[in-house]
Image: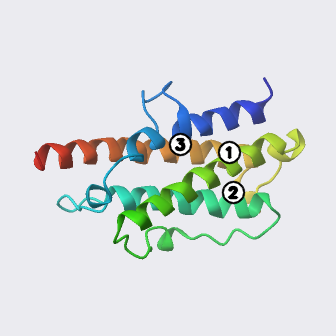
Amino acid sequence: MEDKYALAKRFREVILNGTWIANTNYNDQLTNLDWKIATTQHQSLNTIAALAQHIHYYINGITNVFKGGNLDIRDKYSFDFPPITSATQWQAFLTKFWNDAEAFAQHIEQMPEAQLHGKFVAEKYGTYYRNIDAMIEHSYYHLGQIVLIKKLLLTTNN
């Protein structure tokens, strides 16, 4: 399997449909999760919604580069989102998250191998491959947080 197909598969696994690494994924954890739970803060931890929006922020920022745009995302803005205040807003966000994640994976699959191993925006950022791999790892890191926070909240609220 070419690198790009393996990366796209790994990305889909963590966000959309896999169980290979964590025995779960964002879709499993967030679909059917009540918006009130998703937006509840436990002590000083980020909310589940904020963590999901954070990952979505990076997916969109990297996708913009895939499309030939600039790398406009900044860490300092990666948790700046308007609050989700209804089930409708939560569902709309999730729909956008799943659609944008699938588009991200499709961009990877369509990428020429030479580009995949080429410079991502600037030398200091490494290659496209490295950035896609980092996006996958970053997603797993926050998925673990989401799983734990969800368990804390569901245990506390029962």
> Mark 3 highlights which residue?
15
Q: Which residue is mark 1?
A: 130
The tag earlier along the polypeptide, 1 or 2, is 2
Numbered tag placed on residue 77 in the rendering: none
Spot occupied by residue 5 in the image (x, y as percentages of width and height): 75, 32
Quadrant of the drawing holding the C terminus? top left
Identified by mark 1, the residue type is Arg
> Is residue 41 among what the camera can see?
yes
Q: CA distance from mark 3 to mark 2?
A: 23 Å
Residue found at x 44% / y 73%: 81
Q: How is the image coloured?
A: rainbow
Three-letter code for the amino acid on which mark 3 is drawn: Ile
Q: Position of residue 125 (x, y in %)?
A: 69, 57
Gap between marks 1 and 2 measured at Cα = 8 Å
Mark 3, residues whose alpha carbon is within 10 Å: few (<14), some, or many (≥20)? Answer: many
Q: Which residue is the site of mark 2? A: 125
Residue 122 visible somewhere in the drawing: no
Depth check, mark 3 against mark 2: the one in front is 3
Per the model, the C-alpha gap separating discs 1 and 3 is 18 Å
Dots 1, 2 in contact, CB < 8 A:
yes
Front in this rendered view, residue 28 or 71? 28
Q: Quadrant of the N terminus?
A: top right
Q: Amino acid at mark 2?
A: Tyr
Question: In the displayed image of the protein, which residue is found farthest to the front?
Answer: 88
SS of the residue under disc 2: helix
Among the two numbered marks 1 and 3 on one chain, the one whose residue lies closer to the N terminus: 3
65 versus 98 height, above or below? below
- Locate residue 77 relative to residue 124 in the image: left or right: left
Q: Secondary structure at mark 1?
A: helix
Q: Nearer the viewer, mark 1 or mark 3?
A: 3
Residue 10: x and y in percent read 61, 33
Earlier residue among tags 3 and 2 = 3
